[in-house]
Image (tube, helix red, strand yellow):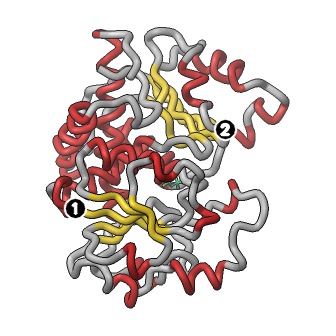
């Protein structure tokens, strides 16, 4: 049972499959006239986002509401954080309101794990993205999307393209793909956007799209994460698009039925053309939709652990 969900690393294949299977059972809730199940009735979930978000924050809120929990959205810009309140004091004050779970996004790597060391035994922390470190719920909704379209992980080649160096999403995706037994995981990026330890991550490295996209089943595009870049990693966005932007011509290197994914937000004309982002092979908006069911699964599994076990995984 999992109480916190902080990263993919440390989980077993069975645990990831349990999340995916549970999410599958929640997809039908969206088809009901009343889009709710009573699993988390009476529980309080706090969205605590110290960085901007559109998809993650709203799909967590929807997931919690679909499970009948009460949801608090803390607006950090108008909170006492601006008056110098520390992260832990903010946490303790919100915990004093009998909160059961915190969904945390923070610019510092390790922030969610740090908080998990201080909450009461009946409280869960879910990492919604910490610095460059991890974005495990994004990785799980990406795995759910891949399983929906490509079906069998053992047969698929996946290419992750772009700013691997600054991407918490890429790290979590690579870990999840390897745990789920993907046939091949590739990264395609200029050298300046690859981490120094890339060879230890269980991926094949390519510098050109022509080689890296050849015969892949899944293409995952990444945004240039300028908010985490210090210094010049690229000559210009225009030049980056000329070399690494996903156009219809480059998409043709992949298998004809390859799917195109992107965690969002997308920057059209920088890492992906509108023609591809809005084209028939794009499943970018389906990823967002599946995010609700996957986050429902993670919330319900974590909350279910409160009565049964204090073990963190
Ligand atoms: N994919 C993702 O984390 O998007 P948001 O920043 O909008 O939450």
**Horizontal side of residue 177 vs 181, given as left or right:** right
> Which residue is labeled 1 in the image?
156
Could you tell me which secondary element the residue under label 1 belongs to? Answer: loop
Reply above or below: 12 against 182.
Answer: above
Tell me which numbered mark, 2 or 1, is placed earlier along the sequence. 2
Q: Locate residue 29: give its quadrant.
A: top left
Please report the residue visible at 76 percent of the width from the left and 24 percent of the height from the top.
86
> Which residue is labeled 2 in the image?
108
x and y percent of residue 2 in the render? Answer: 34, 22
Eye-nearest disc, 2 or 1 = 1
Please report the residue visible at 40 percent of the width from the left and 18 percent of the height from the top.
312
Quadrant housing the N terminus = top left
> For the view shown, which residue lies furthest in the front direction?
199
Q: Locate residue 119: give its quadrant.
A: top right
x and y percent of residue 60 in the render? Answer: 43, 42
**Horizontal side of residue 243 vs 83, given as left or right:** left
x and y percent of residue 269 in the render? Answer: 55, 82
Reply above or below: 43 against 21.
Answer: above
Badge 2 vs badge 1, beta-carbon distance below 8 Å? no
Q: Locate residue 50: give its quadrant.
A: top right
Reply above or below: 43 against 186.
Answer: above
Q: Nearer the viewer, residue 21 or 29?
A: 21
> For the view shown, which residue lies furthest in the bottom direction?
249
Please report the residue visible at 64 percent of the width from the left and 46 percent of the height from the top.
51
Q: Nearer the viewer, residue 43 or 135?
A: 135
Could you tell me which secondary element the residue under label 2 belongs to? Answer: loop
Q: Nearer the viewer, residue 193 or 133?
A: 193
Is the residue at mark 1 in contact range of ligand 1, meaning its CB lies under 8 Å from it?
Answer: no
Mark 1, residues whose alpha carbon is within 10 Å: few (<14), some, or many (≥20)? many
Distance between mark 2 and mark 1 Cα atoms? 33 Å
Please report the residue visible at 38 percent of the width from the left and 62 percent of the height from the top.
186
Mark 2, residues whose alpha carbon is within 10 Å: few (<14), some, or many (≥20)? some
């Amino acid at each position: 049972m999992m109480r916190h969900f902080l990263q993919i690393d440390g989980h077993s294949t069975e645990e990831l499959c349990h999340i995916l299977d549970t999410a599958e059972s929640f997809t039908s809730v969206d088809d009901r006239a009343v889009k709710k199940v009573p699993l988390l009735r009476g529980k309080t979930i706090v969205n605590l986002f110290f960085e901007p978000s559109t998809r993650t924050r709203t799909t967590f809120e929807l997931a919690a509401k679909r499970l009948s929990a009460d949801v608090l959205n803390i607006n950090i810009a108008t909170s006492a954080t601006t008056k110098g309140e520390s992260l832990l004091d903010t946490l303790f004050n919100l915990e004093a309101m009998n909160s059961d779970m915190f969904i945390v996004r923070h610019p510092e790597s390790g922030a969610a794990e740090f908080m998990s060391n201080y909450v009461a035994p009946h409280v869960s922390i879910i990492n919604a993205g910490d610095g460059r470190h991890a974005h495990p719920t994004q990785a799980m909704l990406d795995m759910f999307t891949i399983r929906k379209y490509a079906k069998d992980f053992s047969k698929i080649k996946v290419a992750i393209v772009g700013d691997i160096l600054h991407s918490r999403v890429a790290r979590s995706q690579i870990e999840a793909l390897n745990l789920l037994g993907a046939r091949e995981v590739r990264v395609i990026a200029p050298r300046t956007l690859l981490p120094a330890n890339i060879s230890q991550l269980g991926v094949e490295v390519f510098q050109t799209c022509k080689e890296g996209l050849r015969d892949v089943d899944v293409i995952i595009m990444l945004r240039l994460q300028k908010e985490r870049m210090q210094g010049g990693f690229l000559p210009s966005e225009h030049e980056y698009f000329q070399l690494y932007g996903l156009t219809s011509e480059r998409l043709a290197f992949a298998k004809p039925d390859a799917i195109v994914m992107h965690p969002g937000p997308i920057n059209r004309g920088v890492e992906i053309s509108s023609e591809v982002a809005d084209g028939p092979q794009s499943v970018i908006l389906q990823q967002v939709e599946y995010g609700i069911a996957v986050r429902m699964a993670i919330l319900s599994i974590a909350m279910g652990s409160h009565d049964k076990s204090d073990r963190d995984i």
